[in-house]
Image (cartoon, coloured by chain):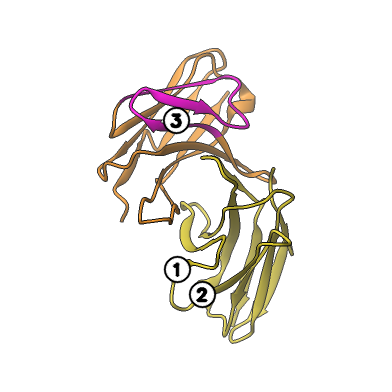
Chain colours: A yellow, B orange
Amino acid sequence: QQPVQSPQAVILREGEDAVINCSSSKALYSVHWYRQKHGEAPVFLMILLKGGEQKGHEKISASFNEKKQQSSLYLTASQLSYSGTYFCGTQDTGNQFYFGTGTSLTVIP
Amino acid sequence: DAGITQSPRHKVTETGTPVTLRCHQTENHRYMYWYRQDPGHGLRLIHYSYGVKDTDKGEVSDGYSVSRSKTEDFLLTLESATSSQTSVYFCAIRGTSGPYNEQFFGPGTRLTVL
């Protein structure tokens, strides 16, 4: 049930781009993306629904391939504030959510 | 700010003692969730509630019970704490903006069982 994220960790210089991937073995209704800073709660970034609707931060973009049950989060022109651990969460047709183990992103000057 | 608080924020207890964690929301959301977060495992669902007195188990529910007697409060109880339950516990509410159901998390409770 738990989605698989890749890569596990990535280090970027300011201004570089990154892609984080999330893959599930089950048919999904929605995919969510969250960012968590050390010692803090996860913060919602974006949600993508089956059928194409999505909602989220202006500076964040993501895609959802329903046929492959895969989602990707695109971080462009990275800033120091983008550092943190990114989680994808998935929901099938029920009320439960399953989270990946996270991708650690570090942006250096 | 999703209006979610958790108490206590930190707790140290001994093996075998009962522990209750509280999640309080001010948003009148129907769905509430309890997760635990451990290194290497991400967030794992313990229990969730879909209304007053309506709850269901998640993937790691053994050793935990929950109760929801009011919309705003969702309690997580460890009947007899064990060291394997040392973790950070997050409560979450589920958004109800149309078809969107993103989750908003409370600040977390760090529990240490000695």
Q: Residues within 10 Å of mark 1 (few under 14, many from 20)?
A: some
Residue located 59% across and 87% down the image: A15
Front residue of B81/A28: it is A28
Q: Do callouts 2 and 1 point to residues on the same chain?
A: yes
The amino acid type, in three-letter code, at marker 1 is Gly
Q: Position of residue B107 (x, y in %)?
A: 40, 46
Q: Position of residue A9 (x, y in %)?
A: 71, 64
The amino acid type, in three-letter code, at marker 3 is Lys
**Label 2 to label 3: alpha-carbon separation:** 36 Å
Q: Position of residue B33 (x, y in %)?
A: 46, 37
Front residue of B87/B104: it is B104
**Label 2 to label 1: alpha-carbon separation:** 7 Å
Q: Chain of mark 2?
A: A
Q: Do callouts 3 and 1 point to residues on the same chain?
A: no
Examine the rendered structure and indicate whether residue A25 appears above or below residue A9. Answer: above
Q: Which residue is mark 3?
A: B11
- The span picked out in magenta is B46-69
Farthest residue toward the front?
A51
**Label 3 to label 1: alpha-carbon separation:** 34 Å
